[in-house]
Image (spheres, rainbow, N blue to C red):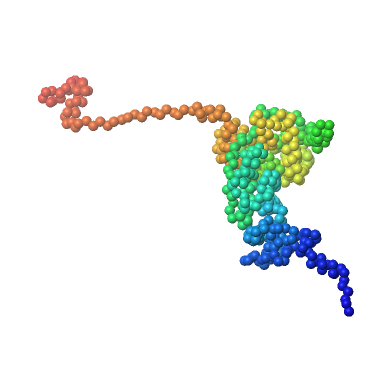
Amino acid sequence: MATKQNPSKTASKAFAKGSATQALDTLKNRSVVPIKSTIEAIKGFPAKLVIFKIPASPFFWVRYYDSKPIKRSTKTTEKREAIRFAKDFYEQLVVNKRLGISNNSKKSSFVLCAEQVINEDLNKVKRKELAKTYVTSQVNIINKHVMTFFRNYEIGDIDYAALDKFKTYLYEKELAAGTIKINFVCLKKIFDYAQRNNVITTSPLLPKVKNEDNARGYFTVMEYKNLRQTTRRLVGTVSEVIQTVGEGEDVVKKKLRNIVITDEIQHLIPFMVFTFIRPTDLKNIKHKHIEIKEGDEGEYLFMPIPTSKKHNKPITAMPRATEHYKRLRDERLKELGGGKGGTSKKVDISEEYVFMPTYTNRDYAYAKIARQFEVLLKEANLKTSSDGDVRTLYSLRHTSLMFRLKYGAEINPLKLANNARTSVEMLERFYLAQLESSEYTKDLHAKKHPRLRKKVSALVITPAKKRSEIIEELVERAGVGRVGKDGIIRLNDEG
């Protein structure tokens, strides 16, 4: 009895038989499905690593099973080249797995290493080993130029020639030498990471970047007076920040925020000038970090403030900083109902921040201070210096150091550097270099004191004489007698 065949099964068998000759006509054969006869394992490597060919490509492909198949085209029709590619591919997979790096074919090894460096830095921020602002700056630099240029590079293929091209690329972007140097600092971090984790054996030699020291911009005495007068005049005023979008008739103006000039900034500016602190310290200084002491020149502030830029030495302020701190402190006590002008109740503000104490978000508090200062600079026409340098809050720190060097008594640079939480090298490069020759006029014109001529004494030894001859000579010199021919000394009446 003849059996009837299922038409669908017959059709599927016919389809399977025809798949070898009609490969490109089916969806299945357009995927990366190996031709069984071409599958070959690589000697000396795990059996899960194989090369093969597919119907839809003339090139050899490589496949490795690691919980799921990972496939890549070798981009070559030569079997020997395909085997070499497979070996390199396997070694890279092992390294990536050890590092916890994704084996995403769309990312080069340089990008993967750069991303790991960024992740490391972000973890250091969580552990409070690095400042968030520093890491944010580094991430922006890596993403903007470093990643853009080396995105398609394998990190092992980057040599001195490629790095020199990158240097040229940065100069063509008209970046300052200091900014270019920072880009290479970020690159070195990426290479160091790759070397530590055995992605590369050695780091390439980096091109040298000539870094020209730009003198720090500061306020002259007249500019500082202008800034202080402008501040007093604007306290209590409100300035609007307007954003302009579009061009021509399509211009749209949008109000972003209001900036109120507070009384606090009147004391903040001289406080910075007379304490040598960095602007970022404004976020962290609490009343408990300030102690009023008595010195030879009157009261002064002793400030063991939190660590900044890896410096933790206490700062000794100039005497004039004391009055501005006291006003800030008394105003806060008055607001809380204690101290001068308040009730008799005792108020403890030791754990409060000195500046913007009502803001728990210290980055936002700092932003409000910086925005007020921007308004003051604009109103006082001090936004840029005579040399074209853009001024910021940091200019107040530069001013404090320059005022001390120019108008203070002679001081050991090491003591000033330690007190300002910097180095003597930084003082010499950015501050002492700005002092005009007139500052050294007295030393330049000073003369050496003339040496006193030494009296030369000589010892004269005369020929030996008899005792009688010496006596005769003395008698005649004294005029008290004479010596006769017989050798007898005859004294006159005076003798």
Residue sitting at 68 percent across and 42 percent down? 281
Q: Which percent across, then down, holds residue 442?
A: 52, 28
Q: Nearer the viewer, residue 282 or 175?
A: 175
Whether 38 is drawn above or below 131: the answer is below
The residue depicted at 66 percent of the width and 66 percent of the height is: 41
Q: Residue at x 68, y 31 (%)?
A: 384
Q: Residue 91 in the image: x percent, y percent?
A: 64, 60
Residue at the bottom extreme, as displayed? 1
Quadrant location of the C terminus in the rendered image:
top left
Q: What number of labels is visible?
A: 0
Residue at x 71%, y 36% (from the top left corner):
268
Q: Quadrant of residue 385?
A: top right
User: Quick check: 203 above or below 489?
Assistant: below
Residue 270 makes an appearance in the image: no
Depth check: 447 or 135 in front? 135
Place residue 175 in its image quadrant. Answer: top right
Q: Residue furthest left?
A: 486
Residue 394 visible here = yes
Depicted 206 relative to depicted 443: above or below: below
Using the rendered view, name the quadrant where residue 94 is placed: bottom right
Q: Residue 79, image x and y in percent?
A: 65, 61
Relative to the observer, which residue lies in front, 239 or 105? 105
